[in-house]
Amino acid sequence: MTRIRVFFIQVLKYQLQKAFFCAIVRYSATILMSDLEPQKQDSGPTMRQEALAFIWETVKVVVISLAIIIPVRYFLVQPFFVKGASMEHTFEDGDYILIDEIGYRFHEPARGDVLVFRYPEDQTQFFIKRIIGMPNETVEIKNDQVKIYNIDHPEGVVLKEPYLSPGEHTFGDMRIKLDPNEYFMMGDNRLQSSDSRRWGPLNKSLITGRAFLRAWPISKFEVFQHQSY
């Protein structure tokens, strides 16, 4: 809600400035015309009409903005600022990203997707991590590698992770079986990430959406596609 308030305050501020400027221009023009043509009677809008027109324009902007922003904000996409270093160098501290909130209503999350979700140990906070392990799989972390056991690979397969920075180390020594609605999440910056290695699997009900676009900084604008495995 804070971002929505800020947006409408900015819109209202812009409209006030615009209306004030236009009123000054029109008023000045009226006086100038009166000075040049004193014999001509002013038939322009009154101050009351100007005020009512301004109020009506402002109401229209607010109503139209609500009609557009609220459905988009609550049902389609949601903006977030990345805070921290756990996803470097895919996402940096301060990056402004948009997440797709509706896509997972039509398809399941995929391995490699970067998700924004509610932190299981404090659901007032939002985390951003990457899906490593899928429901019903077994994830093993050992010897600086991630190994996945599932129906297709009952003997296990070492996960290829092209999104990691060269020389990135995956510390840990664990093996965990995921339930039908659970995902194993890790940050791309494994040394700086608090993830499923510490607080366990993520339940699907806590997923907010998939990070699909970085809007800021402009120099790093990017649309993120699903990773292929």
Image (tube, helix red, strand yellow):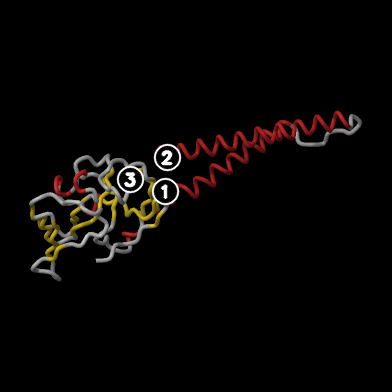
In terms of depth relative to the viewer, which is nearer, 120 or 163?
163
Amino acid type of the residue tagged 1 in the rendering = Arg
Q: From where the camera sits, is residue 215 visible? A: yes
> What residue did someone put label 3 on?
92
* Percent x, y of residue 211: 34, 53
Residue assigned mark 2: 3
Residue contact between numbered discs 2 and 1, judged by CB atoms under 8 Å: yes
Front in this rendered view, residue 53 or 125: 125
Secondary element at tag 3: loop
Q: Name the amino acid type tagged 3.
A: Glu
The answer to which of marks 2 and 1 sits earlier in the sequence is 2
Q: Residue furthest right?
A: 39
Question: Which amino acid type corresponds to the residue marked 2 in the rendered image?
Answer: Arg
Label 1: which residue? 73
- The residue lying at 14 percent from left, 45 percent from top is 198
Q: Does residue 168 sit above or below 81 in this rendering?
A: below
| Gap in angstroms between the C-alphas marked 1 and 3 | 23 Å
- Quarter of the image that includes the C terminus: bottom left
The quarter of the picture where residue 38 lies is top right
